[in-house]
Image (tube, rainbow, N blue to C red):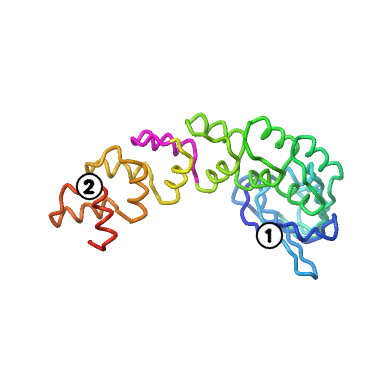
Amino acid sequence: MRMITICVPLLLPLLATSATIHGEWTLSRSADPGKATFSLQSSREDGNHFSSSSDWNVSEFRGLDWSASGKHDVHFAIARDAGTIDCKGFLEGSEGAGLFTFQPNAAFPSEMASLGFPGITDENQFAFALHNVSLAFAREIKSAGIRNVDAGKLIAFRIHGVTPEFAKDIRAAGVDANDADKLIAFRIHGVTPEFVREMRAAGVNVTDGGKLVAFRIHGVSPEYVKALEKLGYANPDPEKLIGLRIHDVTPEYIESLRAHGMQNLTLDQLVALRIHGIN
């Protein structure tokens, strides 16, 4: 499930007084074939609220007849290990709206605790259902040997797309990827196995997770490294690459300096010139 937006004061305060949640749902067309954009929102008189919108496989809407023509009443359910989202309302074509009720699965917290993920309560169980943190997913993550994973990080894994396959593939690229927070950071910033291999092919063999994240944050790309190489700066130090990007030392800037007679400058000199405003 690809998350589009989620606006939640941790999603959880809403549940503080009741395990059952009520709210509104809408359905609309998705740009992805075989999917629909499903939105849920709810609010309470005490000010707690949540709103989420994401693309779901149409097969998940159990009991919904997409082929029926005209505006008609519908009643469908989305069953997850953590509980069931029961929806009533209307549908016309691929557009619809109505009311939902979430009923948590009372056995889910103890089943997750038996897998090594305690601490799931009435106050947060809806989040596990919404993001489809299933028992199977929890088992797979447990088997993947990822450190520092707790129940909350399982939700973050689902939101950001951390899977056992991603962990395996990034390790195969030579990166130490056994920590939960590091894997989440990789997904947030776009550190992929492809990126690691492309950087290596460009002459920068970095397997340190922190530097790879810094590369993505500051725009150190294979294309940037190759452009520097063409200007005579082959195999630059990773820290220097980050510094160059932080201070906006671009290939165009280097060529501009050379056009003004400043030749054979070192990377450190280029950064110093940028810092002092020499253009």
Question: Which label was assigned to residue 72?
Answer: none
Image quarter hosting the N terminus? top right
* Residue 60 x/y as whole percent: 74, 44
Tell me what residue is drawn at x 26 percent, y 48 percent. 267
Q: Is residue 88 above or below residue 120?
A: below
Name the residue beneath numbered marker 1.
8
User: Which residue reaches farthest left?
Assistant: 261
Give the mark toward the camera: 1 or 2: 2
Q: Is residue 165 above or below residue 132?
A: above
User: Tag 1's secondary structure?
Assistant: loop
Horizontally, residue 104 falls left or right of residue 276, namely right
The tag earlier along the polypeptide, 1 or 2, is 1
Q: Which corner quadrant of the image does residue 6 belong to?
A: bottom right
User: Tag 2's secondary structure?
Assistant: loop
* Residue 52 x/y as whole percent: 68, 57
Image quarter hosting the C terminus? bottom left
Magenta-span inclusion, residue 153:
no
The stretch of residues the image draws in magenta is: 190-206
Dot 2, how many residues are within 10 Å of its Cα: few (below 14), some (14-19), or many (20+)?
few
Tell me what residue is drawn at x 75 percent, y 65 percent. 48
Front-most of residues 25 and 114: 114
Name the residue beneath numbered marker 2.
266
Front-most of residues 13 and 70: 13
Tell me what residue is drawn at x 41 percent, y 51 percent. 218
Tell me what residue is drawn at x 34 percent, y 43 percent. 223
Real-space Cα separation, disc 1 to disc 2, in angstroms: 49 Å
Residue type marked 1: Val
